Image (cartoon, grey):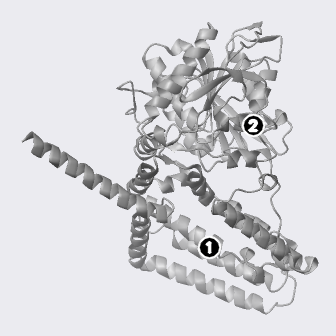
Amino acid sequence: MARDGKNVVAAALSRNELDLAAHAAVAALTGGLSPASMMLAALDWALHIALSPGKGFDLAKQCALASCELAQRMQLAGTVDSRPVRALEDPRFSADSWSRWPYWLYRDAFLQIQQWWEAATTAIPGVERHHEELVRFFARQWLDACSPSNYIATNPAVQTAAWRSGGLSFAVGMQHVLEDLRELAGVPKNDRASPSHAWLPGKQVAVTPGKVVWRNALCELIQYAPATETVAREPLLIVPSWIMKYYILDLQPHNSLIRYLVDAGYTVYAMSWRNPPEAFRDVGLDDYLQDGFFAALAQVRLRHAHPVHAVGYCLGGTLLAMAAAALFRDGRGSELKTVTLLAAQTDFTEPGELGLFVDASELAALDALMWHQGYLDGRQMSSAFQLLNARDLIWSRMMSEYLLGRRSKPNDLMAWNADTTRLPYRMHSEYLTSLFLNNDLAEGRYRVDGRPVALSDIEAPMFVVGTERDHVSPWRSVYQLHLLTHNPVTFLLTAGGHNAGIVSEPGHAGRYYRCATRARGAPYRSRDNFLQTTPVDGSWWLCWNRWLRDQSSAEVAARAVDEGLCDAPGTYVFEK
């Protein structure tokens, strides 16, 4: 009887692995996207639009009016476009050359088609919201691919460049195509051709002096050498995201947040996560809490008898919020002086366009792909982020590099972005399912040490930063933390995107921010009401520094860093 039971279990496991293998094979062909999810969304949209004659009439009317308008303007062929302002909102068509015949016709026809599809994929009665967003997203991808700015015959700038260079721009562009194809095929670029060659950690970036003072199998802890005679009594512990390397916060000296904090008179610690190999496939989110943040916090507490200013960026901020809730639940909240969350979500009801890739079908495909590999590869993850902003990251880049023959000049942020990492199978699966899909943290179901945690337990003052053009952690989603807590929360919204908005050093042109503080127990202030806050020109780093100073208790003499295990930036940052 026992043998029969074992045979049943073995058969079940075999069937499950067969299913996973089949899903993984399909996901590998589709780049991790679920064809079932896309087909269901398209079917939902098509059936409901077929059952909406009023919507169909409006779309037909819009099409007829647009055709009549273009036909009327065709009579002006050969004259200068009288309405160039209409296209200035779209950077693809902002050049004056788009105002000439026949290019203004290509442009205006495309913009009208784009406007028609926007109307056709929104406000369809009965379509599930997630399906509507998927159809709208993929319609935009298709339209962006068909833009006249992407083709030689319809782009005046490309034709002008080819004429002036005697066709050399096409030759250089073809060379760029061949170089990129070689890289896709796994042939490494020449060091001089690589954008990361000029930005090596420990050489040009991640050069703030310090020591690795502790290491385990998951992360290293770096302590930075003081730059002032006195420092704030409470140290800072920075928890970066493990989606990318930590040195996004320590680029060049002039735009390094870590260098800025050291120069401002703080004792700064930063965690550097390991780039996990396939052997880490069963490392879970709880391991990142226990062997990551809690272990690092314990090391900082061994060196300082004072509470810690904890700072979390992106996914590291989500991890910090979980940890802070657990510490206050267990009566250990006094270990944290303050909590700062940088572009970090805690409520995932409005995850923005990243939520397009998170539903049950999509997660089944991604889970199977990660099961097969043991991790999610950095290139696969970056492809999803590129899709979210394909107009700028894919099509505009291809037009510039392949049609105009202009390579983008590498910079430190580009080099960091190319320094991808992997994500363990179990951790990423738990993260997507528990947080993105089920929203367990915001709804009080997420468990740490077997017991649920609630963000409302956090009593420490919080400083929360959102960025205006964030595709990863939309600021409106980040702002939801106000509904989950009652402690003092200072919320700051800064210009820029998920990365560039955080790397916003003093003197950076065009930077501004809005900031408001909710006192303990104060009533909720809506997001739209927050936007009425008067913007302040300059870097948000200055505002945060003032807040940290107000929260710190005193000044103490700075202490030199111990001998340590090795110099910063450590060893894990170099793992490929």
Q: Position of residue 149 (x, y in %)?
A: 74, 74
Q: Reply above or below: 546 against 470.
A: above
Q: Secondary structure at mark 2?
A: loop
- Disc 1 marks a residue whose amino acid type is Leu
Dot in front, 1 or 2: 2
**Residues at badges 1 and 2 in contact (C-beta under 8 Å)?**
no
Residue 128 position by quadrant: bottom left
Residue in the foreground of this view, choosing between 333 and 516: 333
Asked if residue 517 lies left or right of residue 196, the reply is left
Q: Residue lying farthest bottom? A: 75
Residue in the foreground of this view, choosing between 288 and 385: 288
Dot 2 alpha-carbon crowd within 10 angstroms: few under 14, some 14 to 19, many 20 or more: many
- If the image is split into quadrants, where does the N terminus sit? top left
Q: CA distance from mark 1 to mark 2?
A: 39 Å
Asked if residue 419 lies left or right of residue 508, the reply is left
Q: Position of residue 111 (x, y in %)?
A: 68, 75
- Disc 2 marks a residue whose amino acid type is Pro
Residue with the mark numbered 2: 201
Asked if residue 312 lies left or right of residue 175, the reply is left
Q: Reply above or below: 137 against 205.
A: below
Dot 1 alpha-carbon crowd within 10 angstroms: few under 14, some 14 to 19, many 20 or more: some
Residue in the foreground of this view, choosing between 68 and 43: 43
Q: Position of residue 48 (x, y in %)?
A: 39, 73
Residue with the mark numbered 1: 143
Q: Write the residue at 51% across / 21% down.
A: 294
Residue 486 can be seen, yes or no: no
Residue in the foreground of this view, choosing between 568 and 242: 568
Q: Secondary structure at mark 1?
A: helix
Q: Write the residue at 43% across / 44% down.
A: 429
Residue 37 can be seen, yes or no: yes
Q: Position of residue 137 (x, y in %)?
A: 55, 64
